[in-house]
Image (tube, rainbow, N blue to C red):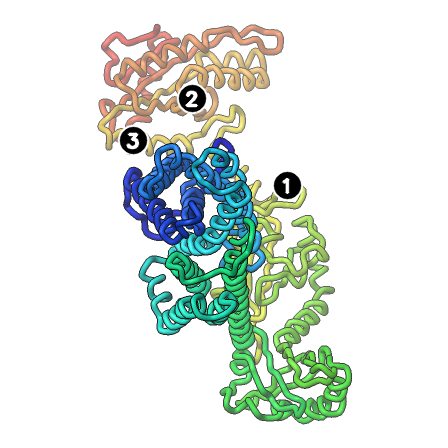
Amino acid sequence: MSEWKEEPQITAGRDTGLQPWWRGLVVAACCAALAGLSIALSCREVGMATLWYANAFGACCLLQSGRRGGWATLAALTGGLLFANGLAGADLRAAVLYAAPNLGEMVLGGWLLTRSPDWRQIHRSPLAGWRVWWRAVLLPALSGATLAVLLLGGTGVTPQSATQLWLTWFEGSLIGTTALLPLGLSLLVHREGGEGVRSLARHLVTGETVALMGLSVGTVVLALPHLPFPFVYLGLPMLGAAMRLRYLDVVLQVWLVSLTVGATIARGGLTLPPVHGDWQTLLLHVPLLAALLPPLLLAAAMESARGRQRALERERERLRQLYEHTPAMLHSIDTEGRIVAVSQRWLERLGYPVDEVVGRQATEFLDGPSRQRMLQQAWPVLMRTGEIRDIELRMVCRDGQLVDVLLSSTGERDARGRVVRSLAIVEDVTRKRLAEQLAVQFQRMSVMLASIGDAVIGTDERGCIVSFNPAAVAMTGWSATQVVGQFYGTVVHRRDLDSGEPLLDPVLSCLRDGHCVNGQAARLQHRDGSSRVIRETITPMRDPDSGALIGAVATFQDTTTAHELARTLARQAQHDPLTGLPNRLLLQDRLQQALQLARRSRGCLALMFLDLDHFKQINDRQGHDVGDELLRQVAGSVLGAVRASDTVCRLGGDEFVVLLPQIGTAEDAAEVARHILVGVAQPYRIGGASLHVSFSIGIAVFPDDGEDEATLMRRADTAMYQAKRDGRNGLRFHHALDTGLGAP
């Protein structure tokens, strides 16, 4: 059992709901019942069972249980065999000696079944049934008979000679397993397929099944005692049943016949002719095997044939459905040119009901020139060669509309090679020719489009590119030959200007909705990885007669320079050109936002006016270039002394403003001002000179010093001048000029 291959337990269908110990009892009881039945059906004078069913049952149980449950199942089978042998009168020693070869056959048969998937095909493949027979029936029977001779020979348990013992054991196992194993495997296959007991019973309990089973059993009862060469007659009704019934019905019938044969022989209903020697049992078992085995193989063959027939019928139905419902226009005609079958697409396109088409000449649905071309040119070629390709015709719809088509037909030949029927494929090329005309129009316009500086891309009604002017080539990096036939969105990769997320294909949206897409700005991805800003317009094109959408034209221009210029102007409008700090305009915007936040949160903010002390003297002595560089470095010092959330701006000249949103107290603002004063107090080396500067700082706090922008600006400025009057290089609060908050 250590070499047992893992086999998944068969769990399809409803679970039995039995506990493991209950399953063991059921297995043991069934094994004991089959063993006892075999003993009861055997000839008493032989000394051992001559028809043995238990080994087939044990192999099926081991196959189902797999490696995990194999030991428990083997133990249950052992108990069943010992019980049956003991009940038949054998002592413990004899019972063990008889059980050991049987268990060996069960293990070998179950193991060989797990090593081969053929048992799942036993009901529909004679070859699979034959392989299962010699692997799981013949080989275990040979090994069991040999082991029985080794264990029982010379022990006195059985009075038979070694040859007779081997033959009796081998033939009993062979016949019993041949009769019962197919039934057990078939039940496992049906259970694996989810077929329940009720479903099986409905198939088994039918008038035909019962009648044929009764005929087979009756033949056994009549032939064995009364007819010469009785085994000749046993196979006839079973062969008939194999041709009519399902495989499961046949294997059940085979087992019932073996039971009937065993019972008849046990009652003395069959007298064998006198034959000397140990080979007399061959006169019984070889003919019985010859009667049982062919119906099993024939039933599998018939099941296979019926399965192929069902598959063929399903395939025929599938082909019929495919023919009738294919998106292509199809019709079949006989040798007289009459339509015998037609697809649904053919009927829908031309507008005819099927009863107005089938039986009529195919040429009746063509216009005059097409009918003449078909009869004089195409039809003779079809009858002679069996094939015509791409014949240009014009068909007439039921409402009189003409449809341009290409007809290709292939003939079906009989055994003599004559064309007896033909299948025609009709391709509607009306839209194709319209597209070709559209492509010609685009080609004529290519000269004009080549001179346009904007990118111009034409598409068909599906959104596939049909024209691509040189400007589009330059903006995308793709050549016209590379993109023709591709969807617009797969070539023109556009992203959102702000988020950078890919944008949906605007051409498909235009064709779906039938509306223009005007002036949409996006970032166009070049093939080389660069990008540029474009402004895109998509316009649908319609057929002038029908008004149907036939394509779209996409135009876009490179607005990168204008976009960057607008961004630069916007930054210049809000930032100081000398220091890069926000200017008064941006300060007002951020002050408004900070005030709104402070009002909602009932918090505080501070506005500080900073003025460089004696900056005019530096400008006069060192020059304006040195003064400008000093302002840039001072701006950097102030930025380094404040928080990232604070705003430092330059109003002009040597005046700076610092906005401190969301401060806790006025002292927090004073602390920031002191950091600024300390930061700017360091010497600045510019042009070989070491310069020292300081700030006079005025502070206004919301809401103590004002609740609007203008008031805070004015009072911070007033406090700054007060700091200058107080001696410079210090800070003053507007609301507390007399509190002593001064220079650090």
Provide residue 345's location: percent of width, then percent of height.
54, 78
Query: Splitting the image into 4 quarters, where does residue 77 fall?
Result: top left
Give the residue number, with chain letter if any, for mark 2.
Answer: 656
Count residues near mark 1 (Cα–Cα under 10 Å), then give few for <14, some for 14-19, many for 20+: few
Query: Splitting the image into 4 quarters, where does residue 613 fall?
Result: top left
Considering only order in the chain, which callout, 1 or 3, is on the residue closer to the N terminus? 1
199, 99: nearer the viewer: 99
> Residue placed at 50% from the left, 69% from the top?
228
Label 1 near label 3: C-beta < 8 Å? no
- Between marks 2 and 3, how big is the CA–CA gap? 20 Å
Query: Splitting the image into 4 quarters, where does residue 367 fall?
Result: bottom right
Give the residue number, with chain letter if any, for mark 1.
Answer: 530
> Residue placed at 38% from the left, 54% from the top?
41
| Residue 42, placed above or below residue 424 | above
| Badge nearest the viewer, 2 or 3 | 3
> Residue placed at 52% from the left, 67% from the top?
229
> Residue placed at 68% from the left, 68% from the top?
442
| Residue 681, placed above or below residue 298 | above
| Badge nearest the viewer, 3 or 1 | 1
**Secondary structure of residue under mark 1:** loop
109, 601: nearer the viewer: 109
- Between marks 3 and 1, how big is the CA–CA gap? 42 Å
Give the residue number, with chain letter if any, for mark 3.
Answer: 595
Count residues near mark 3 (Cα–Cα under 10 Å), then give few for <14, some for 14-19, many for 20+: many
23, 699: nearer the viewer: 23
Amino acid carrying label 1: it is Ser
- Residue 467 visible, this orientation: yes
